[in-house]
Image (cartoon, rainbow, N blue to C red):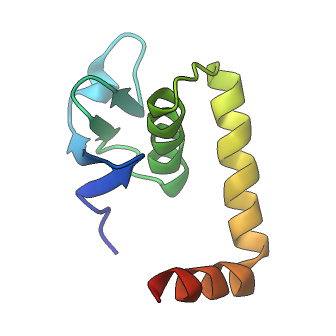
Amino acid sequence: MKIPRRIIVCGMEWSIRLSDTLSLQDPPLWGDCDHERKTIEISSDHPQTNVVFHETVHAISESMGYDPTEKQVDEITCSVLSFFQANKPFIRWLLEELAD
């Protein structure tokens, strides 16, 4: 499944796009979140779920006025994705409930 090109974060539309230039930066980046432009860029070399979700956590945090460290974002990303993986029946139920 392809990465969605648009998401809604705290009521605002954000765009997600793959980038061929992020990995060329010094230091190389796997992803970048630009709060002013409401864009998330993902390195086309690393379009992994955890990178996309990591940048989404940045977008949510910044939209709420928080400024977590990279370590905190990494910990939130790992914890939430682990929770999703371990609780697929709950996630399916939650998505069905939200669909109504």
Q: Position of residue 53 (x, y in %)?
A: 51, 49
Q: Position of residue 68 (x, y in %)?
A: 63, 22
Q: Position of residue 9 (x, y in %)?
A: 39, 47
Q: Locate residue 58 relative to residue 85 in the image: left or right.
A: left
Q: Locate residue 26 relative to residue 20 in the image: left or right.
A: right
Quarter of the image that includes the N terminus: bottom left
Q: Position of residue 67 (x, y in %)?
A: 57, 19
Q: Quarter of the image holding residue 85?
A: bottom right
Which residue corresponds to the image point at 47% horizontal and 89% vertical from the top-left? 100
Which residue corresponds to the image point at 40% horizontal and 34% vertical from the top-left? 31
- Observer-nearest residue: 27 or 78? 78
Above or below, comparing residue 16 to residue 82 in the picture = above
Q: Of all residues shown, which one is farthest toward the top? A: 26
Above or below, comparing residue 72 to residue 13 in the picture = above
- Observer-nearest residue: 63 or 87? 63
Which residue corresponds to the image point at 46% horizontal and 85% vertical from the top-left? 99
Which residue corresponds to the image point at 26% horizontal and 22% vertical from the top-left? 36
